Amino acid sequence: MKKDYSLWSLFTKGLKHNEGWDPAWRSADPKPSYNVVIVGAGGHGLATAYYLAKEHGVRDIAVIEKGYLGGGNTARNTTIVRSNYLWDEATMLYEHALKLWEGLTEDLNFNVMFSQRGVFNLGHTLQDMRDIERRVNANVLNGIDAQMLDTAEVKRMIPILNTSKNARYPVLGASYQPRAGVARHDAVAWGFARAASKYGVDIVENCEVIGMDLAGGRIQGLQTSRGFIRAERVGCVASGHSSVLAKMAGIRLPIDSHPLQAFVSESMKPVLDTIVMSNAVHGYASQSDKGELVIGAGIDHYTSYTQRGSPHIIEHTAAAIIELFPIFSRVRMNRQWGGIVDTTPDACPIISKTKVKGLYFNCGWGTGGFKATPGSGNVFAHTIAKDDPHPLNKAFSLDRFSTGHLIDEHGAAAVAH
Amino acid sequence: MFVLFCPHCQEKREEEEFGYGGEAFRVRPSTPDTVDDETWGDYLFMRSNPKGWNWELWSHATGCRKFFVVKRNTATNAIAGSWTLAEGRKVYDAEGGAQ
Amino acid sequence: MSHRVKHSGARVDFDRPLAFSFDGKSYGGYAGDTLASALLANGVRMLGRSFKYGRPRGIVGAGPEEPNALTQVETGAATIPNLKATQVELYDGLIARRTTGWPTLDFDLKSLCGPFSRFMPAGFYYKTFQNRTLWPRFEHIIRQAAGYGSAPEEADADTYDHRHRHAEVVVVGGGACGLLAALDAGRAGLQVILFDEQNEMGGWLLSSPNTVIGGEPAAQWLKTIIAELRSLPNVEMLTRTSAFALHDMNLIVAVEQLQDHLPLAERSETKPRQRLHRVRADRIILASGAIERPLVFGNNDLPGILTASALTTYLNRYGVGVGKRVVLQTSNDYAYQGACDLANSGCSVVLVDTRMRPNTAWEQRAHVAGVDVRPGYGVAAAQGGRAVKGVKLVKLDADRNVMSGEGPTVECDAVGSSGGLSPTVHLYCHDGGRPYWDEEKLAFVVSATGRAAAGIYCVGSITGTFGLQAALAQTQQTVGEVIASFGKAPAQETRKIETDEPEATPARRIFRVPDGKAEGHGQKAFVDFQNDVSAADIHLAIRENYRSIEHIKRYTALGFGTDQGKLSNVNGFAIAADALSKSIPEVGTTTYRPAYSPVTFGTLAGPHEGDTFEPRRYTAMHASHVARGAVFENVGQWLRPQYFLKPGEDQEAAIRRECVATRRSVGLMDASTLGKIDIQGKNVREFLNRVYANAWTQLAPGKCRYGLMLDENGMVMDDGVTACISDEHFVMTTTTGGAARVMSWLENWHQTEWPDLDVYMTSVTDHWATAAVVGPKSRQVLEKLCSDIDLSPGSFKFMDWREGTVAGVPARVFRISFSGELAFEVNVDASYGHHVWEALMEAGAEFGITPYGTDAMHLLRAEKGFIIVGQDTDGSMTPFDLDMAWAVSMKKPFSFIGKRSFARSDTAGPNRKQLVGLLTDDPSVVLAEGAQIIERPDASLPVAMLGHVTSSYFSPELNRSIAMAVVRDGIQRRSDDSRKAGRDVLFAYSRGTTHKVKVVSPVFVDPKGERQNG
């Protein structure tokens, strides 16, 4: 792929008043038929199309999107990328993604601003510390860069953290993954869109799926707001809206869609150079390159597709952040927002074939989807291309909900953000 | 953030007083031991999760502790009403149950 | 040069001079000034440098729309970053600093980028810095260069308050319409709360005191209406209160600034700094007005270029002239009043009207005031270095927004521009409302009664009703509807309120003033000042196919600043629409999200910080524990003694002492935190049969039984002992952390699935205090305090309970044991807990009775292999995995919760992780809780893991270490079990160290249970 984004191109195009830039991706009208149609042009969907084209040689692909590209959870998350999960299956999947993240900017020729500033998962109770010990040991044995830190070490690395013994829930220690980081979330969607587009993938925005045509237990195509699209294979990557799509194919999913809220502060000089997450106190924070504190809240407990949640959740999160960082009490919230997260009973995703031949689902990422973006797209592309799961997503099939083989990341896991 | 009407207390109260109980009127197989794994898995884990009107359980957690049902639109947060479980069941059935 | 213009109409008190400092220099101002007006009055116009290119920047607005003048106010613990100088009320001694400009304001390093700005268009960073190794270094530089103010370095000494309330009517905005709305609603007897973000009510009328309204000057009209509102007991007016969010079902959230306007020394330590009002309103009247947007033209970011309304506000409200030779540029009528006022104050004023034909009435007034009106011109570009020195005019085409000829250059020292009004529709849109584009008004507006069904009404400029007289009439009519919706009638006849405004004429549809050049070729024309987004950047985004308005916003950062695009969004949408050849409605708006204005974290948190972050729950014996040196552990919200330190002891020694005393003589433990649920009714036994894995049909009154509670997935979720008080009365105990969850779980099952069962449940956790008397001497201790229960082993057996009197207090005594020792749990009314605890301590003194904490409790139970749910289980363990088949009755007729799940292929299958005991080869090694179990110590990564250590201790009883673990096929591996398969040697890995272990039974002490049964 030609690397046409560079310092040189900025210079030459700049000389000509930046008039020579090409569209980052090609907006297409839907063709009547495709080999593969991906429903949902978020990070995961676009990554799926990219890897289908790049690694599996599939050329006749469309990604259709009911709104604008990258406008769902890709556009509204707190961008944390890490792989320090508890169970082998989850760890390996997220580590696969993390490895892809590490080369993503160069691979896409698009700076996704992946910033490996490390993540601390704080422990506040004795049971937290047992869980952290268990998870860190599991991570190390899986080859993941995980460390366990005591309070003094945490304090040394994050001097502004409140490590007082008198805190309501004192910090007893933390796990630390240095390779974890944050990324520029919108850029991930744009970068994948651009790269997929270069492989000839059709990106069709403002195209909503309103029905699925099935015959003989096989997908035939999609009824959309822009007409019928025949497709041999359809991959649905629609996060919070997955249940709505599944229903069109007569499939039920173990998903509840909930609001997940987050907020940012006003932009400030660098004050926090890492990511801090606390399960017991219910908050997590990092600081963006622009200087805003990016803060995540817990999910609202009711189901909703409204992309907004209840204010007491935000209030509780602000309290948690002050509990962790008393110096932020006078800092101000600039903007809050909500996304729709697709939660599953075991806090793990579904990347799976379905009972309908040629129809695949990739959903249920809950609060943890962004970090998996390249990995998710990569293994889902494999699943669609081979009609068989990649070894890394075998365990994430739908049938685990009838065999009982759940991968319970709730159990002793850290916050699944 | 909602205001919910508790049909037991006959009071409108803030959402913070209530606990969300998920999809209402899910049916536990009457003889679990005789159903197959898929049926059991469907009951255990699968959810309608509609975008639109949703019959859902709430409990008046810091009030009377009673469960009741609410018909709420998950796309707009509009609420059509609250009923006791028994009354709600009648309305739900009259509407044709889970369509 | 900007300067003070003292006049009697100003809202500043020239008799009250104040001193303040900015960037280390001392200045003077007056009470009523904002930091912005005071700085301008002192001739300070450059306050900072721009985000990306380091361009000089000054004040643009006069309120929350200000994009540039972000200041750091005060120092030390009192400092606040990023306050807009336009919103900081001046007080004596105020200290403020700039937030940009490094190393100095005059020489800013970023300004070196200026000449290279063409190589740094929107999104340039996506296209470069791609080298993996170098990126972190680039990023470091980017981070250092970004950001405005600094976070405080000390904890906040101030407090914050929350007030939750109801109102019949909330009015947002205390301008002419808001005041009138509150008055009419108030007069009709409705309970009204009126919020306004400024320091006094009046809104735009404060900037326009000479407007004649109802036959009198605005200043007088305001005085009268505010006085009447004050006299109404049912109306509450809150100034300095910004309504920043509207949530579902008319929940308005507002921040009231209680002390920020006071000198530091005068602030009360006992009062909150700010208060959050959460108001659930029956009706909301949004009278939030509109904000004037500037026109976009070359170099429009030079200091000295403001919105026309800001220029007017500084003059009329604050008595500050921003310049002496002023150029105003307008597309509409609104700038004329200001032009007249400026001219009357002694400025020379050139009014550039982009329209071919101005409003004749206004033009006449302007001429009378001496304003030089130049119709048909536009400002193509401003000139100047650190402040505006002149403007280059161009002649505009009558129909299309293109240049039709050159114009003169006009020297000036201030410029004001008006591109029209943008209604403040933010709150209306927070909960799902949408504005629509009014092509005539050239604004995104909302309808007055479009959401009346939801109780939301809108009046005044927010609806696009920009004329004052029309807005007041609309307010009267709309509030009439509000009053009627309560079934009430207005207090008096509606009277027409007349003003002196000339009839309005249409505005010119212009956003970007042409300069005769292709976009990107001329001088930079900024749309969003705070993020350095130019019109050319928007064109570039579209060229690169970022065509959705959300893409444009995200690619260029348009509207992402702390002003939330109040000045820039509509211009950005319009420029994008033109570039896309679409209409503005087709382009649409970005989403409006709270907060309308930034809100302090501390205010959001309110009282929930520090000691009151979350409640602490104490048992009735807490004082006893504190007095005996307890170190506490957080268990949920509870504080439980973890161990009791004696002088000279460390934690390990304390635990050892507590365990030894308990096993050899007698220990005393506070078990009050366990959840307790009182269950009564005819069908309790059946209910218990359904919710527990084991059987309850045969349990006789006076007996207790341990039960495992499963979720429907078949996994252990809680456990505890339940006592049969009578056939229709049981008391269940739960884990400490699980109490609330179990209660809710049981209620859910009963009410939704089995309402036919006659069962009533009450949480009695806090009603009872529980002291566990544990150890071989426990009977002797209890005998001293209890004479009405036969404690002899033959009469009071293990797993019995008895009612009686302990230490003179009615008690339920359970003979149950979590330690494997002879033990009695004494339950008394919580209010006697302390008394009974102390009585037990006294009675046990001769035996050396020893209070022990959770650490010793954990150790003692681990020696017996008793599980702790949540520590030895994690939501993936069945009773069979725990080798507790004895606690499951598969024969019960009702398929109890979780039973069906056992039969699924994976749950019933081989290779499950099972609970076992582990003994290290080296008895002195205590494994880490959380160590992973592996098959070989030398395997290469990734290493297959068989399970993990859940509990691990040094057992004083055995004088060696012991551990519990869940291990794949663990039960078959046990060396002590007949089912063993000879694979009992494994390794435990933790933090780089591996220890050889042997898999054994988890029951290490007294496997036959002779002690507890004794």
Image (cartoon, grey):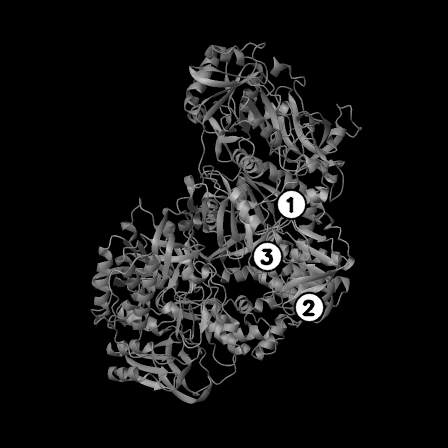
Q: Amino acid at mark 3?
A: Ser
Is label 1 in contact with label 2 (beta carbons under 8 Å)?
Answer: no
Is label 2 in contact with label 3 (beta carbons under 8 Å)?
Answer: no
Q: Amino acid at mark 2?
A: Phe
Residue A262 visible, this orientation? yes
Q: Chain of mark 3?
A: A
**Which residue position holds label 2?**
A228
Q: Is residue C705 left or right of residue C314?
A: right
Q: Chain of mark 2?
A: A
Q: Is residue C702 left or right of residue C54?
A: right
Rendered-image quadrant of the N terminus of chain C: bottom left
Q: Secondary structure at mark 2?
A: strand
Identity of the residue furthest to the right in this view: C981
The answer to whether marks 1 and 3 sit on the same chain is no
Q: Secondary structure at mark 1?
A: helix
In front of the other: label 2 or label 3?
A: 2
Identity of the residue furthest to the bottom in this view: C405
> Which residue is at the front of the view, A306 or C295?
A306
**Which residue position holds label 3?**
A115
Give how far across and how far down residue C704 sits, in percent: 58, 21
Q: Quadrant of residue C694?
A: top right
Q: Is residue C502 left or right of residue A294?
A: left
Residue C46 visible, this orientation? no
Q: Secondary structure at mark 3?
A: loop
Q: Amino acid at mark 1?
A: Phe
**Which residue position holds label 1?**
B45
In front of the other: label 1 or label 3?
A: 1
